[in-house]
Amino acid sequence: MTRPAAPDPVACFMYHEITADPSTSGFQRRGARAYACHPRLFESHLRTIASVGSAPALVSSLGLPSAAPAAGTTLLLSFDDGGVSALAAADALARRQWRGHFFVVTNRIGTRRFLGRDDIRYLRSCGHLIGTHSHSHPDIFPRLSVPRMREEWETSRRILEDLLGERCHVASVPGGDLSPEVIASADVSGIDVLFTSEPELHPRQVGRCLLVGRYAVKAGLAPATVAALLALRGWERARLYRRWSVMARRGLGPLYRLYVDRTTATDRAPRSSR
């Protein structure tokens, strides 16, 4: 059962790598480069956020599992993949006494360009929230069977819970593709909050799982655009563009699978380095 949308907006920004050299952190697939944000630009984003008085919160402040935002706009910051540049992003937030959400691909822990076990513990010790971004980051998550989706969530949750000694109850969808089956698999896997790639301002509850939309930050996003988004301008345009993109991909059928195979081939053989 889907409950009515919360009346107050939650503006969530989705970052990936925060680095001057994308070759040093995270996935090396062609599509990932579009989301690498230079540290100087990231600092400009944070200054813009501070200038309008929108200190980021954690999703736990909304209340779980039946979240209901406090009056006014709530700002959340999230970081996908678990690349090693997450440490610099987390420290930039910590200097302002801000907190963020860091989503980890658990079969990459300790491999080249990704966070190690001690790194993840450090992020948590700074007050940041750690969640799962699946175990192996399947390239087109909705094409998995529901049992395979559950295996991805549950394997990743167990690894993070063993690592941190606490329940892992938040997740973000790998690849961003959403479907009713993806939502259901997260729900039955014990995930309370599922961060999506849909640029939606109003979280919605589906079963026991809260869906939180996010605006995907790409390389070169101007601070002025961040300010506009904080003022709740531009979300509808982003939502329509996202909807068009999803429809276009679905229309490609097998050609989309071929495109994904070609653009992700360099990321398929993780080797432990620490």
Image (spheres, rainbow, N blue to C red):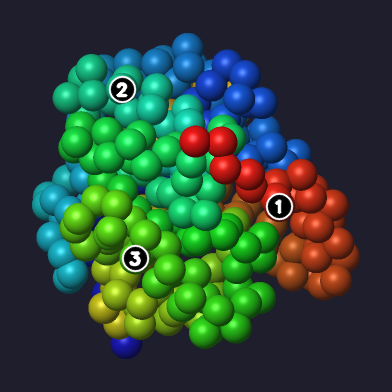
Tell me where residue 230 sits by quadrant: top left
Label 3, residues with CA under 10 Å away: few <14, some 14-19, many ≥20:
some
Q: Residue at x 14, y 51 (%)?
A: 61
Depth check, mark 2 against mark 3: the one in front is: 3
> Contact, CB < 8 Å: mark 1 with mark 2?
no
Label 2, residues with CA under 10 Å away: few <14, some 14-19, many ≥20:
some
- Which of pointers 1 and 3 lies earlier in the amino acid sequence? 3
**Residue 172 % position (x, y):** 43, 57
Tell me where residue 90 sits by quadrant: top left
Return the residue at label 2: 91
What is the spatial separation of the Cα atoms under label 1 and label 3, in whole angstroms?
A: 22 Å
**Residue 133 % position (x, y):** 46, 56
Circle 2: element type: helix
What is the spatial separation of the Cα atoms under label 2 and label 3, in whole angstroms?
A: 26 Å
What is the spatial separation of the Cα atoms under label 1 and label 2, in whole angstroms?
A: 29 Å
Amino acid type at circle 3 is Arg
Depth check, mark 1 against mark 2: the one in front is: 1
Return the residue at label 3: 158
**Residue 91 % position (x, y):** 31, 22
Q: Which mark is residue 155?
A: none
Amino acid type at circle 1 is Arg
Vertical arrangement, residue 141 with respect to residue 130, above or below: below
Q: Residue at x 58, y 58 (%)?
A: 137
Q: Residue at x 53, y 21 (%)?
A: 19
Circle 1: element type: loop
Tell me where residue 243 sits by quadrant: bottom right
Give the left or right position of residue 58, taking residue 20 as reference: left
> Contact, CB < 8 Å: mark 1 with mark 3?
no
Return the residue at label 1: 268
**Residue 16 % position (x, y):** 51, 37
